[in-house]
Image (spheres, rainbow, N blue to C red):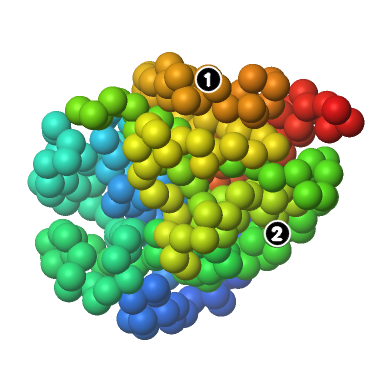
């Protein structure tokens, strides 16, 4: 037993030495601020940032809290990762959402780092709550839309786990290689519907949008409506839903309990689309939709399984 304890002590000391060698380190966040970390942050919280939450969990980092609406649900892969790490996350969201965060609760958590999501691409001072957060703990800003993997690379650098990131990237490359995409030339349209005062409307996703880059990586051809660069989706009235005519049509409704799928399908125009009448329409559940629209590397295994399952149900020989 003494030998085991001695061995464990040596390993622990070695790990501590490695950590000590990694710090201090300076990392530039998305806003361009150079943040110096004297040691590895241990009490990390996230501001409305399910993307960074997924990526921290995948990197093996256990945050202590986050802010998210009580009406939102964490994706199954996020819940599974939290369970595997054996942690509990405290939600410092003010209720009802979108009231300001509960700053007293946040301060009581004694964080040593707050990771904040930048939706705007502006200066830190323009971000809501930034100045209040800075009074509680250092703030590290990451970007919302991440097409090139820079967000998770920043996080890996902050926590000195670049080797882990290399493993994740290799795993993702292997998993995406397992996708069986539709044949070349088969075009996929995506949208989801809702009812407004005028009846059924819809959001249509445009080829090249940030939310669909993961599908393009998997070999899918997304219908492009010639919208301005960077425009991820746009609203259309019911009479214009004919633009969704394609080889495949997926209804992506990412929020649990949302009735948008039924609203969309109730449209006579949707029902009369050839892609629907010929059985090439699929209504995705909220988990499947989130894996596509809110993809993170943590979701990759579920995403690949979903895509192969969906494509397998099509007969492209017809």
Q: Tell me the quarter of the image containing the C terminus.
A: top right
Q: Please, what secondary structure does the residue beneath circle 2 have?
A: helix
According to the image, label 1 marks what residue?
Answer: 271
* Residue 271 horizontal/vertical position (percent): 53, 20
The relative height of residue 305 versus residue 134 in the rendered view (above or below) is above
Q: Is residue 268 left or right of residue 110?
A: right
Residue furthest to the right: 317
The relative height of residue 38 versus residue 223 in the rendered view (above or below) is below
The disc label shown at residue 169, or none:
2
For marks 2 and 1, give the one nearer the viewer: 1
The relative height of residue 282 versus residue 68 in the rendered view (above or below) is above
Which residue: 84% across, 32% down?
Answer: 316
* Residue 261 horizontal/vertical position (percent): 45, 22
In the foreground, 176 or 88: 176
The relative height of residue 97 versus residue 24 in the rendered view (above or below) is above
Q: Please, what secondary structure does the residue beneath circle 1 have?
A: helix
Q: Quadrant of residue 124?
A: bottom left
* Residue 265 horizontal/vertical position (percent): 47, 20
Q: Tell me the quarter of the image containing the N terminus.
A: top right
In the foreground, 48 or 278: 278
Do callouts 2 and 1 mark residues in contact (Cβ within 8 Å)? no
Which residue: 39% across, 20% down?
Answer: 263
């Amino acid at each position: 037993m003494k030998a085991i304890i001695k061995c464990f002590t040596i390993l622990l000391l070695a790990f501590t030495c490695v950590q000590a060698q990694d710090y201090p380190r300076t990392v530039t966040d998305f806003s361009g601020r150079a943040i110096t970390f004297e040691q590895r942050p241990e009490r990390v919280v996230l501001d409305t940032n399910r993307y960074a939450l997924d990526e921290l969990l995948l990197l093996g980092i256990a945050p202590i809290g986050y802010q998210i609406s009580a009406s939102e649900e964490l994706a199954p892969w996020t819940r599974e990762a939290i369970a595997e790490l054996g942690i509990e996350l405290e939600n410092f969201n003010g209720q009802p959402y979108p009231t300001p965060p509960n700053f007293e609760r946040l301060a009581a958590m004694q964080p040593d780092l707050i990771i904040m999501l930048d939706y705007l691409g502006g200066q830190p001072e323009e971000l809501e709550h930034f100045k209040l957060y800075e009074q509680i703990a250092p703030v590290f800003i990451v970007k919302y839309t991440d097409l090139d993997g820079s967000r998770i690379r920043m996080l890996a650098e902050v926590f000195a786990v670049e080797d882990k990131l290399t493993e994740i990237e290799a795993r993702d490359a292997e998993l995406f290689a397992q996708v069986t995409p539709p044949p070349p030339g088969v075009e996929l349209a995506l949208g989801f519907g809702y009812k407004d005062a005028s009846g059924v409307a819809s959001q249509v996703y445009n080829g090249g949008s940030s939310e669909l880059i993961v599908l393009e990586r998997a070999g899918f051809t997304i219908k492009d409506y010639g919208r301005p660069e960077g425009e991820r989706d746009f609203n259309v009235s019911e009479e214009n839903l004919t633009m969704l005519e394609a080889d495949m049509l997926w209804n992506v409704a990412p929020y649990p309990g949302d009735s948008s799928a039924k609203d969309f399908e109730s449209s006579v125009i949707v029902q009369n689309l050839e892609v629907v009448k010929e059985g090439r329409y699929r209504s995705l559940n909220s988990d499947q939709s989130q894996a596509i629209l809110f993809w993170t590397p943590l979701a990759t295994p579920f995403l690949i399984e979903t895509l192969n399952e969906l494509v397998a149900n099509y007969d492209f020989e017809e």
